[in-house]
Amino acid sequence: MTHETKTMEVPVAIADRVQALIDAYEAKQKFNAERRAVVNNLLSMDGLSCEMAVYSLPQEELLDTLRFVYELSGTNSRFVTNILTQTRENPKKKLSDSQRSSAKSLLFNLLNDPSVISAMKESQ
């Protein structure tokens, strides 16, 4: 039994768009896997160690982890949305001290949220 493969020509623009969608999907899966590992590591720590680890995260990792946990929690926070939008529009801009402190505090609180813990257990 042999399988015959048929190919068809598609316009370059469509092929490029399909490839871009595939690349975006793969990048999102890689991002989720990396953040899942970070969050699992944070969740495995005791409260004080977790808080210290969250407060020592560099800005980029803090925002990536906050984005992942925020999406996972299903909460709706205007503050988080504003920070994530602001950094997406201007990734080189540093957060103010108050924004950074608030983001760390919110991340730590979200990590202790039961919805995040159960979502992480379900996804394993």
Image (tube, rainbow, N blue to C red):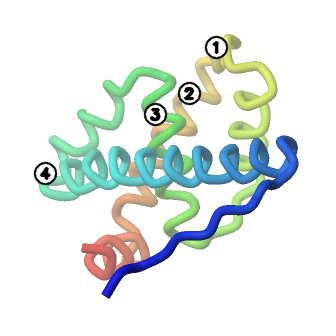
Marks 1 and 2, how far apart at CA:
9 Å
At label 3, the amino acid type is Leu
Marks 1 and 4, how far apart at CA:
28 Å
Badge 3 vs badge 1, beta-carbon distance below 8 Å:
no
At label 4, the amino acid type is Met
Marks 2 and 4, how far apart at CA:
22 Å
Q: Secondary structure at mark 1?
A: loop
Badge 2 vs badge 4, beta-carbon distance below 8 Å:
no
Question: Residue 100 vs residue 21: left or right?
Answer: left
Q: Nearest the camera: 63 or 102? A: 63
Report which residue position mark 2 lands on: 100
Assess disc 4: are there few (<14), some (14-19) or many (≥20) residues with their C-alpha within 10 Å of its C-alpha.
few
Q: Nearer the viewer, mark 2 or mark 3?
A: 3
Q: Nearest the camera: 93 or 33? A: 33
Mark carried by residue 45: 4
Judge whether 121 appears above or below 16 on screen. below
Q: Nearest the camera: 32 or 83? A: 32
| Quarter assignment of residue 121 | bottom left
Mark carried by residue 94: 1
In this figure, what is the number of numbered marks? 4
Badge 2 vs badge 3, beta-carbon distance below 8 Å:
yes
Give the residue displayed 41% in from the left and 21% down from the top: 58
Assess disc 1: are there few (<14), some (14-19) or many (≥20) residues with their C-alpha within 10 Å of its C-alpha.
few
Among numbered discs 2 and 4, the one appearing first in the sequence? 4
In the rendered image, residue 116, in percent from the top left (x then y), is placed at: 40, 70
